[in-house]
Image: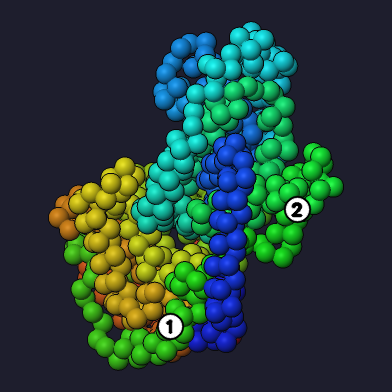
Amino acid sequence: MSFPNKAPSAGEEVGTQRRGGPKAVASVVLLVLIVVADLWVWIRNPDDLDRLLINLLLGLSAFATLHLRLLSLASAGFAAIGAYASAIFAVKLGVPIWLAMPAAASVSALVALVIGLPVLRLKDVYLAVATLGFGEIVRVAIILLPDLTGGSTGANLSTGFPYEAMKQTHAWVMALVLLALGWILATTARTRTGRALRAIRENADAAATMGIDVVAHRLLSFAASAFLAGLAGAFYAHSVGSLDAGDFKFTRAVDVLTYAVLGGSGVWFGPLLGAGFLTALPILLRDSLSFLQNFAQLPNIVNGLALMLAIIFMPGGFTSMFEGALGRRGGPKAAGKAGSEAGRARKRWHSAPVPADGLAETKAEGNEPILRLVEVSRNFGGVEALSKVGFDLRRGSICGLIGPNGAGKTTLINAITGVIPPSSGRILFAGSDIAGRPPHRIARAGIARTYQNIQLFGEMSVLENVVVGRHVHIRTSLPEAWLSLPGQRREESHARKEAHALLSRLGLDELSGARASTLSYGDQRRVEIARALAMLTPEPGDREGAARPQLLLLDEPAAGMNEAETEKLGDFIATLKTHGYTVLVVEHHMDLIMKICDRIVVLDFGRKIAEGAPEEVSRDPAVLEAYLGGE
């Protein structure tokens, strides 16, 4: 997500936010009504409890992909695989039911891993159509394999699937599984993986340049969704006691998507609310209105109407009503706090001396090039954005990259960081050619950046944005996080401590709890710098990390700042050199460039027209003509 050139200040947003009182009451009322309705459905007919629990599980499977804005409609196909695989394992192969069901869900996850790499390259409606097609392929395959699945007749007594052998599960087992999954999802949201997933949801390109492997996380989410759908299918097979390919038509996939859209895909419990509401509503309508009792299409009509109304009137789903009740950080309360403290934070930033602590204690060794560009070119169709650009960036130096608008400065930074691959040429970082590598691998090598158009994760807090920068330094796994082991707690605590220290260095410590999108444009710039530095700062005692080259690319960091803030920022950037950082700065403030840079490279129409010390460049006739304006 990119931000406009002028973001509202924290104080300005308070006036535009709605107060959370009535909204909080409405959210609580809604939650109570859904719970009561589901309890009534259970009391009315205990057999409906199985249907409710299965739908809740399918809702979680939709959350796993829609949370990343992946519009997948493969849930019905994966549920079918889980259902038939579990039936085959339990009935035909004699596998114990407690082992057959997770094994069948794992089969669904393995299939997802196989098809995920090609399918997840698609976006939006194309991904929806491809995954919908996958579900239909699975359904047709079930019909065409009668010896294995029962074919068009289905998995029942006549095809070798006795009812007694099939019906082997209980509602309390499903309820326990759902409770465990809810705990896992709630815990994951507070971990390295949870932050990475939220970052990808908001801005995949920025997440990649923070060292997050976007492809791997999307594939992980797709496989998790398939596992949950497969498990729901297995529960369905063993609670109903028979199967039919018609149980997994494309309309079922749309139903599952509706659960997540109506409930809200931004929070893990949103699809549970949607599934609970849409399971109970048709039953309650039939009980209340006698003429609907034999109307078989009522659930489809209710789901379709709910999907349409949610998209039009409540895009955030039911969970959007809970922001006030839950005291979500970055809401009106946090924005008001940010508005009252922003002035004090900026005053300290202006008046305090430039602090030296909070930065990596590394020193530049030698004067060899840390970055070497060799005839780097980039073409966009017939347009040559970069043409054989080459220069060396010495370790521990500050280099300015200047030129008129459209000169290719940002294109060059994008090529260095892997956002776009160069058409030709070499990009050597610490002796290794990184041209064409994916952004997350380049970031992990020791290159961090900011953006010309600010690329913060706007719905996350300021602190969370900077902690995302620590992603490459946090090594604990998800199981360690679920168990809250001491090592995981130490890493999380240290990551937040480092983030607070960097925010303090940049005068943003009192804004750490505010939603990033509520900050002024200049403050957002400083948050981006703090996030980039967080990625480069090694862990204490990490000798390998301390010796790793650290290159910071700043794309117009002073944009949106006043004169005092710009001067203070220049002093801060100058201190980075003394701590072993190498900095490449793209900037239009010539006073700032002349003050902090050791060397300057000038681009014009994608070509390098000058390079040298600031005094030399400022007198170069080509520069005066192209950039500063010749007489």
Is residue 87 placed above or below 405 in the rendered structure? above
Q: Position of residue 288 (x, y in %)?
A: 75, 53
Q: Nearer the viewer, mark 1 or mark 2?
A: 2
Disc with the residue nearer the chain's start (1 vs 2):
2
Q: Which mark is residue 338?
A: 1
Residue 565 image-quadrant placement: bottom left
Is residue 43 visible to us here? yes
Q: Which mark is residue 288?
A: 2
Residue at 63% in and 22% down: 242
Q: Residues within 10 Å of mark 1 (few under 14, many from 20)?
A: many
Lateral position of residue 540 relative to residue 181, left or right: left
Is residue 365 visible to us here? no
Q: Residues within 10 Å of mark 2 (few under 14, many from 20)?
A: few
Q: Secondary structure at mark 1?
A: helix
Is residue 603 placed above or below 479 in the rendered structure? below
Amino acid type indicated by mark 2? Ser
Q: Quadrant of the C terminus?
A: bottom right
Is residue 451 placed above or below 421 in the rendered structure? below
Amino acid type indicated by mark 1? Ala
Lateral position of residue 367 relative to residue 244, left or right: left
